[in-house]
Image (tube, rainbow, N blue to C red):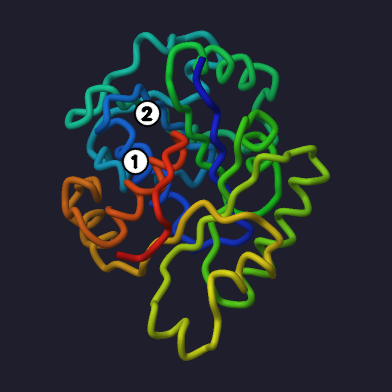
Amino acid sequence: MGEIIAVLSGKGGTGKTSITAGLSTALAKEGKRVLCVDCDVGLRNLDIPLGLSDAAALSFLDVCQGGYTLEQLTPHPQFPTLFFLTAPMNRSAEEIDAEAFGNMVRLARDQFDFVFLDAPAGVDAGFRLAANRADRVLLVTLSDPAAVRDAGRTGQVLELMGKENVRLIVNRINPKLVSNMALTVDDVMDNAGLPLLGIVPDDPNVTLSAAFGKPLLTYTKKGAAAACRRIASRLQGMPVKIDLK
């Protein structure tokens, strides 16, 4: 049986979707069966960092409503064990049948090693759609004070929802800037009130790979790509050191 992982953020612009794509491709590259579900109803864009912007994709609503099955999904052209469901464009998150979505996710757990739910930023209906079904939550934040505060508040919301397996990923870290601000990752953890799963450096290759329509891990092996591989290893229980190299 697989694991359902919701990737969340308290505010927009943290790079949550890029992290989802990076972790998914890193795990698929190791041969794990992975399903990515874009839960950002109406504003979908997970296809871009996955390198699938020109590919036809079923929406999760197509499966929830019974028109298609998970067995009919097309594998990623570069990662044969990676599959993708996009978000519907003609509905709002409030209109999604939460029970039908939950049933689909439960079926996916039986067929995949990892199911990533990429939720919209904030704590509204799309956030809850993903968080309520998750076995584990990855909360993505930046290191600036406003983002850390939002992460802490989001962590409190998750605690009220009964979510205990919540881990922090600090994205787009500039080592020089962090040093000049006298801010450490330990400070971010303390202020957010959450344990750390990984840190990801600020890396222009994330933007460049998306612009060229390529998954980050096929575009470069360094920087954010290497960080995603390390975090993917930790998701599997491997004792990999947390650093920016």
Calculate the distance from the C-alpha at mark 2 to the C-alpha at mark 1: 8 Å
Residue depicted at 41% across the width and 50% down the height: 19
Q: Which residue is mark 1?
A: 47
Residue 165's tag is none
Q: CB of mark 2 within 8 Å of CB of mark 1?
A: yes
- Measuring from the top left, give residue 165's x and y in whole percent: 66, 40
Circle 1: is it few (<14), some (14-19), or many (20+) Cα within 10 Å?
many
Q: Is residue 211 left or right of residue 3?
A: left
Residue depicted at 56% across the width and 43% down the height: 119
Residue depicted at 52% across the width and 88% down the height: 181
- Count the marks: 2
**Mark 2 belongs to which amino acid?**
Phe
Q: Secondary structure at mark 2?
A: strand
Q: Earlier in the sequence, mark 2 or mark 1?
A: 1
- Measuring from the top left, give residue 201's x and y in whole percent: 36, 67
Residue 101, picture quadrant: top right
* Relative height, residue 7 to residue 142 (above, below): above
Q: Nearer the viewer, residue 229 or 242?
A: 242
Circle 2: is it few (<14), some (14-19), or many (20+) Cα within 10 Å?
many
Q: Which residue is mark 2?
A: 84
